[in-house]
Image (cartoon, rainbow, N blue to C red):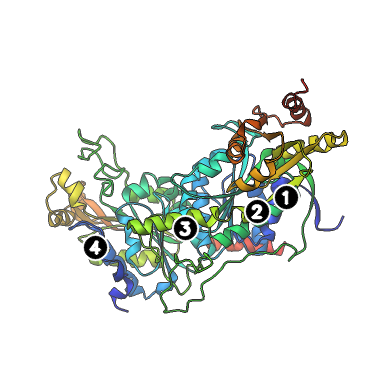
Amino acid sequence: MAVKDYLRERFFPHLWCPGCGHGMVLNGLVQAIEKLGVSRNEIVMVSGIGCSSRITGYVDFHTLHTIHGRALAFATGVKMSRPELTLIVPMGDGDALAIGGNHFIHAARRNIDMTAIVMNNRIYGMTGGQFSPLSGENVSATTAPYLTIDPSFDVVELSKAAGATYVARTTTYHIKQMQDIIRQAILHEGFSVVEILSQCPTYFGRKNKAGSAVDMVKWYKKNTTPIGSKAKKENPELVERGIFVQEERPEYCKQYEKIVQTAMKG
Amino acid sequence: MSDNVKFVQGNEACVEAALYAGLDFYAGYPITPSSEITEGLSYRLPQIGGKFIQMEDEIASLCAIIGASLTGSKVMTATSGPGFSLMQEALGYAIMAEIPCVIVDVQRGGPSTGLPTQGSQGDVNQARWGTHGDHAIIALTASNHQDVFAVTVEAFNLAETYRTPVVLLFDEIVAHMRERLVIPEPGEIPLVGRLRTSVKEGVDYHPYLPREDGRLPMSDFGGVHRYNVTGLFHDMWGFPSSEPQIVHGLLRHLVDKLENRVNQLAWFKEYYLEDAEHLLISYGSAARSARHVVEKRRLRGERLGFLELQTLWPFPTDIVRDKCAHVKSVIVVELNMGQILQAVKLAVDQPEKVFLVNRIDGVFITPTDILNLLRLIQGKGV
């Protein structure tokens, strides 16, 4: 099937700003799914609120655009009742880890089989450029006119600690790696977290003099490095990308099946 | 005692009814005084191949059952005041996206943590107005276990018929009291199943285009029709829209589908209304004492009537106005500061003849409490 068959062209043009990284994530995601060859009828995509969450409208799957921060909770209900379906949950950084932080850690703890994609642009775009828990310190935002003092979560470390069994990070520059990481995340049986650094030239870029969208994507090239690379040892400031965790642990719905079997025996 | 006669708590009656109604999926979070529902279903649901999950909070519980409902499951969650407060945003989502689901609120004293183990009927207005924006809602209640069973089954039927969340407003007293329950035979109470679209694969399916009778056939997630569900105002495909005509049309649809059927949705019981001079109106646990007073005073020849409301929302305004038309006074008995009293006052032609008899101290209202105030209202002194 062609990539465009996964898109709802009826609902284009999309609402993302020129230069926004989220379209590149959409591209990488659809390419990954196309390679997997999963039927569109078997995919449920659940999102919350924010720029990133509008991605559900543009893809031709079963799509559930929910409320702010709660996408993983809705997705848990879908997956528990129909475990054979493939669940993909794209979220923004604020959506996933501010208002949605509790659901994020509990979905990871359960190791329920779904793919959480954190589209991290380090800013609340939809509401006009306020800082998020992933902005980090010394960032300019509309709610940080004197720069941020809030330290950032490390999505990878948080996911590992919470129990996610697949944890990866990539960027919108590394589109081939993004496709491969998403493909493996979907194939992984358990809770998968994929953090994708995605540029917001309109707010983060403009407020922090990060240049154009192209400049911001180039920044990802320059400031990230494969996990454990020599460059990382020489320059600890570099952000590592790649697959950090890929391990087997009993999956939640499979475990529940055992409960059903026990209960049915009486 | 035959197998279908039980001596149970109200919460257990709710569990039995949910299973009778065909519950497939339950998500919940522990909270007094509703926990027996969550506990009961954690045990019973997997025995019939159903699914139970204890979520991280009440917000997640309601979100999870909404997700499960979209796959075609019959779903429920149960909570009490603080948890019901947390659920309000997702409740609005279920209204907007028209997702069948049942939400039990076993009321306890509030506000805030309030009186966790004591009875109250303080969430009546929250059920009606708790979520933001104009909307309509169905809320049912019951005063005894047989009725807990009946309204719980009805809640599932209404949720499916109207594609809407239905709130069951029980209270701690009925929930924790034990009494006899007769479980009806299968088929004795008709069940409403999911109305699914007959649109064939490959043909454009409009999830939000009502049929001529106003109903919207659904298609299960995982099925052949892929569509969008959103809490934004949306068009017939479920795609976000801010077109004034679409916004207006959708809001009217969401309100009218229930408010235009008030009489059809109204469940109530009436006693001795034909010659009543004074009419008591009550619901839930308070109705037990109110009815007792009426029965006893009737034996003495006092012309008291009793109206027990089981549908609280949409409020049966015309029915209440009609029943109150020829009485000298209307006495609303409830365990709050007059939440249904206000609805009754709005309904009747002479609001000055409507009085409140209540308790707000966590103690169950007794027939004596009611009688004392009744004598004042009747002009008989204390």
Q: Residue at x 77, y 47 (%)?
A: B8
- Residue of label 1: B147
**Residue A47 drawn at (x, y percent):** 38, 57
Comes first in the chain, label 2 or label 1: 2
Q: Gap in Å between the C-alphas at discs 2 and 1?
A: 20 Å
Chain for numbered disc 3: B
Look at discs 3 and 4 and give the one toward the viewer.
3
Label 1 close to label 4 by CB (< 8 Å): no
**Residue B28 drawn at (x, y percent):** 57, 49
What label sits on residue A185 in the rendered view? none
Locate the N terminus of chain B and report the quarter of the image it occupies.
bottom right
Chain for numbered disc 4: A
Three-letter amino acid code of the residue under disc 1: Asp
Locate the C terminus of chain B and report the quarter of the image it occupies.
top right
Comes first in the chain, label 3 or label 1: 1
- Residue of label 4: A24
Q: Nearer the viewer, residue B354 or A7?
A: B354
Residue at disc 4, secondary structure: helix
Residue at disc 3, secondary structure: helix
Q: Nearer the viewer, residue A201 or A133?
A: A201
| B364 shown above or below B130 | above
